[in-house]
Image (cartoon, rainbow, N blue to C red):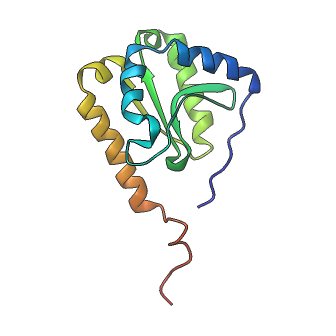
């Protein structure tokens, strides 16, 4: 499978680093479950610059972005910025899962299950490199 490299603005690297060092509680809690390839062996990154945006969590192997919407996402301005970010990144075949900060804190099993369901669906519908071109003849 050919993964597309998504360009990013290098000026966002320091901001992404700052965001990693000042994570919300929800981000910290979810990161403990995703880091180090411990969630089904997939490599997740946090506060990852993509295009002109920074996403909360990103897994290139799964074409997956996970966003955690906290209290700052409840105003109209933030909502429209989130929609713009999602629409632009979806043009790169990225898929979004969104959770609220409250869901992370109080319903972690449901959050992890939703990610697991995405992964299972992705694996069933995406051929591995060894399967590509192995159609019946």
Q: Nearer the viewer, residue 100 or 46?
A: 46
Residue at image position (62%, 42%) is: 91
In the displayed structure, 111 sits above or below 22; it is below
In the displayed structure, 98 sits above or below 22; it is below
Residue at the outermost front position: 36
Tell me: 28 left or right of 107: right
Question: Percent from the top left, x then y, of residue 128?
Answer: 50, 65
In the displayed structure, 114 sits above or below 107; it is below
Residue at the outermost bottom position: 137
Callout count: 0
Question: Percent from the top left, x then y, of residue 76?
Answer: 50, 11
Q: Quadrant of the N terminus?
A: bottom right
Residue at image position (55%, 11%) is: 77
Question: Percent from the top left, x then y, of residue 31?
Answer: 42, 28
Residue at image position (53%, 23%) is: 82
Tell me: 72 left or right of 54: left
Question: Percent from the top left, x then y, of residue 15?
Answer: 65, 16
Which quarter of the figure has residue 28?
top left
Residue at image position (31%, 17%) is: 102
In the displayed structure, 30 sits above or below 124; it is above
Q: Nearer the viewer, residue 90 or 118?
A: 118
């Amino acid at each position: 499978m050919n993964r597309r490299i998504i360009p990013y603005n290098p000026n966002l690297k320091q901001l992404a680093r700052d965001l990693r060092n000042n994570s919300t509680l929800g981000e910290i809690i979810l990161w403990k479950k995703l880091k180090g390839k411990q969630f089904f062996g997939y490599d997740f990154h946090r506060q990852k610059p993509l295009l002109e945006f920074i996403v909360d969590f990103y897994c290139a192997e799964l074409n997956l972005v996970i966003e955690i919407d906290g209290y700052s996402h409840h105003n109209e301005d933030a909502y429209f910025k989130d929609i713009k970010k999602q629409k632009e990144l979806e043009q790169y075949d990225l898929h979004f899962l969104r959770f609220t900060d409250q869901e992370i804190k109080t319903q972690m099993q449901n959050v992890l299950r939703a990610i697991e369901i995405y992964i299972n669906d992705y694996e069933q519908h995406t051929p591995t490199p060894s399967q590509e071109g192995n159609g019946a003849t």
